[in-house]
Image (spheres, rainbow, N blue to C red):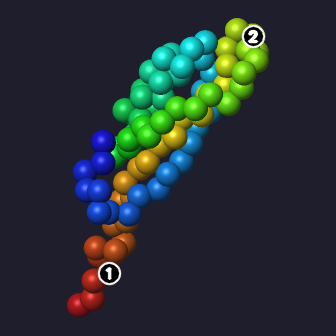
Amino acid sequence: MLQDPEKPFEEWEQEVRAQTIDEAKAKCQAIADGQTLTDLLTVTQATVTPYKGTYRFICWFRSERSDNDDDSNTGS
């Protein structure tokens, strides 16, 4: 979960394979939970025809940047 919505962030996506949208959402949430300061935005289905019993889904994430350089370069 993002701590400061005013901080810079980056959005990114990752592909997962699942049998249902609910299964894909659970996999995507597990990915988000494993990342620091990351929210799951949405999950979209990328294929309509199953391959070996699963569909391709795209997880969309937003992660807060931790730009430590900005804090350390504030002049002396």
Q: In this rendering, would 24 be left or right of 47?
A: left
Tell me the residue that label 1 is attached to: 73
- Residue 54 is tagged as none
Q: Residue at x 43, y 48 (%)?
A: 62
**On screen, residue 69 above or below 39:** below
What amino acid type should be assigned to the residue bearing mark 1? Answer: Asn
Q: Residue at x 45, y 21 (%)?
A: 26
* Quadrant placement of the C terminus: bottom left
Give the residue type that dot 2 points to.
Lys
Q: Nearer the N terminus, badge 1 or badge 2?
A: 2
User: For the N terminus, which image quadrant?
Assistant: top left
Q: x%, y% of residue 46? A: 68, 30
Residue 7 position by quadrant: bottom left
Depicted 59 relative to depicted 11: above or below: above
Q: Would you place residue 9 above or below residue 72 in this image?
A: above
| Extreme-top residue of the structure | 53
> How dense is the environment of label 1, judged by Cα within 10 Å: few (below 14), some, or many (20 and up)?
few
Residue contact between numbered discs 1 and 2, judged by CB atoms under 8 Å: no
- Residue at image position (54%, 48%) is 12
Q: Is residue 12 above or below residue 65?
A: above
23 sits left or right of 58 in the view? left
Mark pair 1, 2: CA separation? 52 Å
- Picture disc at residue 52: 2
Q: Nearer the viewer, residue 10 or 68?
A: 10
Q: Residue drawn 52% across and 32% down?
A: 43
Image quarter of residue 52: top right
Residue 66 rendering spot, x and y as whole percentages: 36, 59
- Please identify, in this view, whether the residue under mark 1 or under mark 2 is nearer the observer: 2
Q: Position of residue 4 (x, y in %)?
A: 25, 56
Label 1 element class: loop
